[in-house]
Image (cartoon, rainbow, N blue to C red):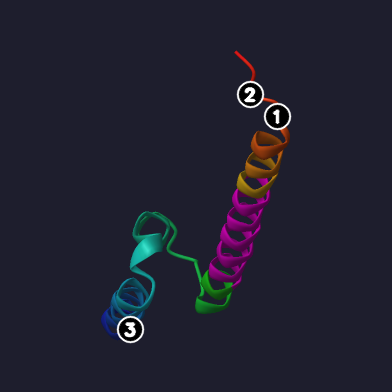
Amino acid sequence: MQAKHCNDLENEKEQLLNEFPEFRALIQNNPNITKEKLLKLKNQQRITHNYQDHQKQDLQKEFTQNFFKTDLKA
């Protein structure tokens, strides 16, 4: 029975590794990690990336606007 339980855990871990390859180290080093926790992490990661991308766009826009406002006298 314990061998079956171990096998189930290995299968579950393999499934998580296939579904969330970006969290490979976390899955391999944390035997208690669940799909729900990984989904939350993935969502947080997506939100962070969206925020960072938005900030980069704002900085680029601000730089461009200020560049064109600058009087380029030598």
Residue nearest the viewer, comparing 41 with 53: 53
Disc 2 versus disc 3: distance between alpha carbons? 68 Å
**Mark 1 neighbour density, 10 Å: few (under 14) some (14–19) many (20 or more):** few
Work out whether 23 lies above or below 69.
Answer: below
Type of residue at label 3? Asp
- Provide residue 64's location: percent of width, then percent of height: 63, 43
Q: Amino acid at mark 2?
A: Leu
* Secondary structure of residue under mark 2: loop
Within 10 Å of the Cα at label 2, are there few (<14), some (14-19), or many (20+) other Cα atoms? Answer: few
Q: Residues within 10 Å of mark 3 (few under 14, many from 20)?
A: few
Q: Is residue 48 magenta?
A: yes
Is the residue 11 above or below the residue 56 in the image?
A: below
Residue 14 in the image: state x and y as whole percent. 29, 75
- Which amino acid is tagged 1? Thr
Residue range corresponding to the magenta coloring: 40-59
Q: Nearer the viewer, mark 1 or mark 3?
A: 1
- Disc 2 and disc 1: Cα gap in Å? 6 Å
Quarter of the figure that contains the C terminus: top right
Q: Label 1: which residue?
A: 70
> Label 3 belongs to which residue?
8
Residue beneath the point at 69% across and 43% down: 65
Q: Position of residue 8 (x, y in %)?
A: 33, 83
Q: Nearer the viewer, residue 2 or 23?
A: 23
Quadrant in the picture for residue 39: bottom right
Q: Residue at 35%, 77% (x, y): give it.
A: 9
Q: Considering only vertical position in the picture, is 74 above or below 41?
A: above
Label count reads 3
Q: Are marks 2 and 1 in contact (CB under 8 Å)?
A: yes
- Circles 2, 3 touching at the beta carbon (< 8 Å): no
The residue that appears at 40% across and 61% down in the rendered structure is: 23
Q: Which mark is residue 72?
A: 2
| Quarter occupied by residue 62 | top right
